[in-house]
Amino acid sequence: MDATLKTPRTTHRRNPSRGSHERAVIDAILDEGLVAHVGLAVEGRPFVLPMVFARVGDALFLHGARASRLLGASAQGAELCVTVTVLDGLVLARSAFHHSMNYRAVMVFGRGAEVLDPARKRLAFDALVDRIAKGRSRQARPASDHELAATTVVELAIDEASAKVREGGPKDDAGDVAWPCWAGHVPLRLTPGTPIPAPDLPLQLTREAPSLR
Amino acid sequence: MDATLKTPRTTHRRNPSRGSHERAVIDAILDEGLVAHVGLAVEGRPFVLPMVFARVGDALFLHGARASRLLGASAQGAELCVTVTVLDGLVLARSAFHHSMNYRAVMVFGRGAEVLDPARKRLAFDALVDRIAKGRSRQARPASDHELAATTVVELAIDEASAKVREGGPKDDAGDVAWPCWAGHVPLRLTPGTPIPAPDLPLQLTREAPSLR
């Protein structure tokens, strides 16, 4: 356990056996999840926005249009809670009470800061594009200075974070094992379908299917 | 557009063409998504928790252990932002700038209230179990009064809500169409794998695969 990651906010009160503060566990979840749910409070009221994100080392990057009000608040140092959840399955117990879902979730807390250094901003931008498809930042037309200027990139250090994981089958009470219904779990996986080329893609490029992560 | 759903908080400032306040659009997303990201502010600091949820008519139900601190705050009338996101695909443009994801997301704002009426609490509980697998609340051993008492159920009215949807292929600038890389989109879908029976499931029940939603 990395002591710097554990604070009162990241201490697991419920089911502590499902919790972790290990960076390897946290990083694996952050690197698999595709959407972050970014929470911030504006005048005491919560907002939760789904966003593309990327991890590079100890930093989480978020981005959006410069005009975005909530991203602007994040860039100006608002407290953030960034939660990334990977749903792994459905858990069917004999008892209604013990039904559950298998998941891996990470919560990262901290204050956002706008990335102003041009080289770091481009690094973040490339990492965000590479979340869509591996290596994609080297194939696509790079962002122009104008496009970078129109984009706000927010950085959040991963130094107060925790993971929570539920896995495996149902945990029925001993008295319920004879209840006559199916029990077990059903894995769930986010699966890519057949790539759909843009209508104006030249014929010779249609067969170059993207390499997904 | 349902005027009661539209408030300053749910007015789309970015890409308003992607926004909707139609209940049919909102309900379809809520009924497909399996995980809600529930945001609340505690002493001005945001928390975002992944939770199982269910919609019944105009109500969203959340639940958790009675001892949960954040659920307790929700039950006591804290302002909530409940965001449900269904990820539909990856969008690969020619330009790095226009890379995106296809998604359908709903944000519901309001104050939570604990469900105390026993009949309504059981209705909510059944609806939450049925999110794991359709009709499951009629197969599983029903919750005992003790189990219901150990569970906090929070209700949130769907009267301030909005949806945002991005779909289809990339929207490249005209000047980028000749850029020599694949462009298009890749659908993503949460797919169930083979059900894994509990190790102590009697042999005659192992073949009764669960009917997923």
Image (cartoon, coloured by chain):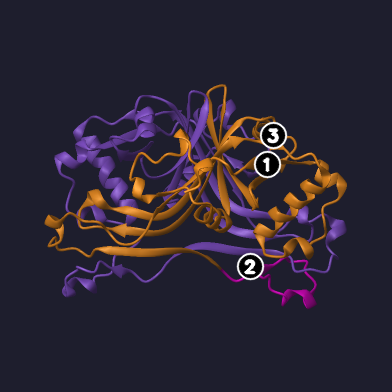
Chain colours: A purple, B orange
Apparent side of residue A157 relative to residue A93 in the rendered image (left or right): left
Q: Position of residue B108 (x, y in %)?
A: 54, 42
Residue beneath the point at 61% across and 41% down:
A19
Q: Residues within 10 Å of mark 2 (few under 14, many from 20)?
A: some
Is B199 in the magenta? yes
Q: Secondary structure at mark 1?
A: strand
B100 relative to A55, above or below = below
Question: Where does label 1 land, which residue?
Answer: B155
Question: Where does label 2 land, which residue?
Answer: B212
Is B115 in the magenta? no
Spatial separation of the CA atoms under disc 3 and disc 1 = 8 Å
Q: Chain of mark 1?
A: B
Which contiguous range is marked in magenta? Answer: B193-213
Question: Where does label 3 land, which residue?
Answer: B75
Q: Position of residue B155 (x, y in %)?
A: 68, 41
Apparent side of residue B33 relative to residue B65 in the rendered image (left or right): left
Spatial separation of the CA atoms under disc 3 and disc 2 = 30 Å
Determine if marks 3 and 2 fall on one subunit. yes
Determine if marks 3 and 1 fall on one subunit. yes
B162 relative to B171, above or below = above
Kind of residue at disc 3: Ala
Spatial separation of the CA atoms under disc 2 and disc 1 = 25 Å
Q: Secondary structure at mark 2?
A: loop
Kind of residue at disc 2: Leu
Quadrant hosting residue B148: top right
Q: Secondary structure at mark 3?
A: helix
- Contact (Cβ within 8 Å) of mark 2 with mark 1: no
